[in-house]
Image: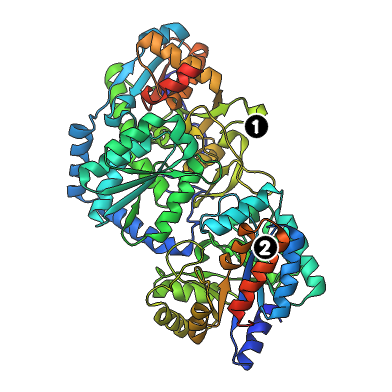
Amino acid sequence: MNKEQRKIPGDYKSAHLLGRFGGQYVPETLMAPLRELEEAYRLFSRDPGFRNRLKYLLSDYAGRPTPLYFAERLSKYAGGARIYLKREDLCHTGAHKINNCLGQALLAKMMGKKRVIAETGAGQHGVATATACALLELTCEVYMGSVDIERQALNVFRMELLGARVIPVTTGSRTLKDACNEALRDWVTNVGNTYYLLGSTVGPRPYPMMVRNFQTVIGKEAKAQYKKAEGGLPDYLVACVGGGSNSLGLFYPFIKDPVRFIGVEAGGRGLKTGEHAATLLKGRPGVLHGSFSYLLQDRDGQVRPTHSISAGLDYPGVGPEHSYFKESGRAEYVSVTDRQTLRAAILLSRREGIIPALESAHAIAYAVRLARRLKRNQSIIVCLSGRGDKDLEIIQKA
Amino acid sequence: MNKIDATFQKLRSEKSKAFIAYLTVGFPDLETNLKLILEMERRGVDIIELGVPFSDPIADGLTIQASSQAALEQGTTPGDALRLASEIRSRSSLPLVLMGYLNPFLSHPPERLAGELSRAGIDGVIIPDLPPEESDFILDPLKEQGIHTISLLAPTSGIERIKLVSRKSGGFIYYVSRTGVTGARKDLSKGLVERIIEIKKLANLPVCVGFGISTRSQLLKIWEVADGVVIGSALIRPFLESSTASGGLKKSIQVLDRLLGND
């Protein structure tokens, strides 16, 4: 099939409507601060001073643009489509999270907030927030589940070294979801001087769109880089989905192009075991952390415990825009188990000399499977969202 | 007439103020819930707020978080809250307000849910994570059953929001006394009295104040200007501090008596 004849999948209509998903389901105390944030974001995202400063930080400080690398040996191994890796793992701090953190920390600074709080799962968002706060002279406190503190100890030390305070969360499942709860409780208490720097495309409006917009630098670069390298457009984009920020960042600039999007969710010990974090595949719509979106929950609407080998995907919710993509058919969602993920991490390390984060290894695992089914003249861009240093202990133990 | 409206009408004619008691359904257990509620009625509580335990109570402090988690671990469901309400309704005419986070409400079509709440004898609902902008889908079916949707106002709410909430809320307005989560505090927040007076000027509904109130003197100060107080954590904490349900019940009633000035 000729590339120009390909169709845009699904009936995705507008960049601004999320159908029934999204919204602002938060305690009354947060309604005014959310309005203030929406207003500030609208203002500053158009302000040339803000935009130039962010552009400068992304290039000279964070190391953008990141390469779009043709993974020749991995492609040869798969024996089908050409696999390209968008190397977000080469960003300063080792993951795509810094793109959003620099944007939001700059916004916090311009709003006159002195204190920044964040939630973190794998610790990548916490490290990126601590980094941006160190650079911009903001006080930083990061909520992290005690389970995650244990399994991502290196990142805890990094945050502390950067001058942030890491606050252990010992309630509920003691993972990312509970860190989010605790960050919201902090924000509700300290709304006056505090900026909540949310790390993914989740939460109440304007966070999902704001975080996505700060991450679209991934897709914009990839699109231009691919065009230069190969001409035209790739056939597929593949990225892991926890909350959904690296995937939306890659997908969004291709929204009106005939390119298929595949989001890879954490299959944990297998979808049948119930021990997974495959929200879009196994959940139903509900409200958690301020927005209406797919959610892993029981019959009574209690949020269900999740499991994933990767702390960054171990979350029962998902960004509302992904729910919209799912229902409109614009993106497809699949899952990859813990074991397949580990194998993919080892495969990429051996074949390409790149040790991926376990989150990103989910996308690698699926991309290899997909490439095998495709023709040699087809291509896939995978978002390699983070590097694997933080996961070495888990990989070693497995 | 809705029981909440009737209660405020009666209190107004007596020049008296409302004492609203919150408890977590299923904590320490349903049987103790019922005993406590019947005691509350005898001692002069005006409205009961039944808290449906939720896995992620983002507006609650440690006391209610702990009680919710314990209730869920014992298998308490939203259905239990309705069964408890029916049981209370068969023995008492106290107004019943169901307080719950939004997500469990979404597990049922709003019309069916409203019917079930009405049959269980619920007079009002409070959904702390449902601001008035997003509430129409559930507000209308509830209204049809004569059930009030009680909205909240907070220290951060501006004049426009006060007007919006007083237009949308039913029964009364729940004023959150401070920025923060639920849980007993030593002091009232600064400017609280002035703030209540401001809201009462703009709103045509009774205004009740909750979050952080745990002593008789705090309560009296609020009663001077507001139409009622909501007390939760102070009544729940004795159960967390006692090894038995009956011990917790005894202590919780002592706290209640102190707050009501019955001692």
Packing grade of label 1 (10 A; few <14, some 14-19, many >=20) is some
Q: How is the image coloured?
A: rainbow
Reply above or below: A376 against B206: above
Residues at circles 2 and 1 in contact by the CB criterion of under 8 Å? no
What residue is at 35 percent from the left and 49 percent from the top? Answer: A117
Q: Is residue B92 left or right of residue A148?
A: right
CA separation in Å, label 2 and label 1: 37 Å
Reply above or below: B44 against B37: below
Residue named by callout 2: B248
Reply above or below: A180 against A218: below
Q: Between A324 and A159, which is closer to the camera in this rendering? A: A159
Q: Is residue B33 left or right of residue A244?
A: right
Q: Is residue B195 visible?
A: yes
Give residue A274's mark: 1
Give residue A376's mark: none
Q: Amino acid at mark 2?
A: Gly
Q: Is residue A256 visible?
A: no
What residue is at 46 percent from the left and 19 percent from the top? Answer: A395
Image spot of residue B156 (x, y percent): 39, 68
Q: Amino acid at mark 1?
A: Gly
Which of the 4 quarters of the picture holds residue A228?
Answer: top left
Q: Between A14 and A123, which is closer to the camera in this rendering? A: A123
Q: Is residue B43 left or right of residue A240?
A: right
Reply above or below: A147 against A113: above
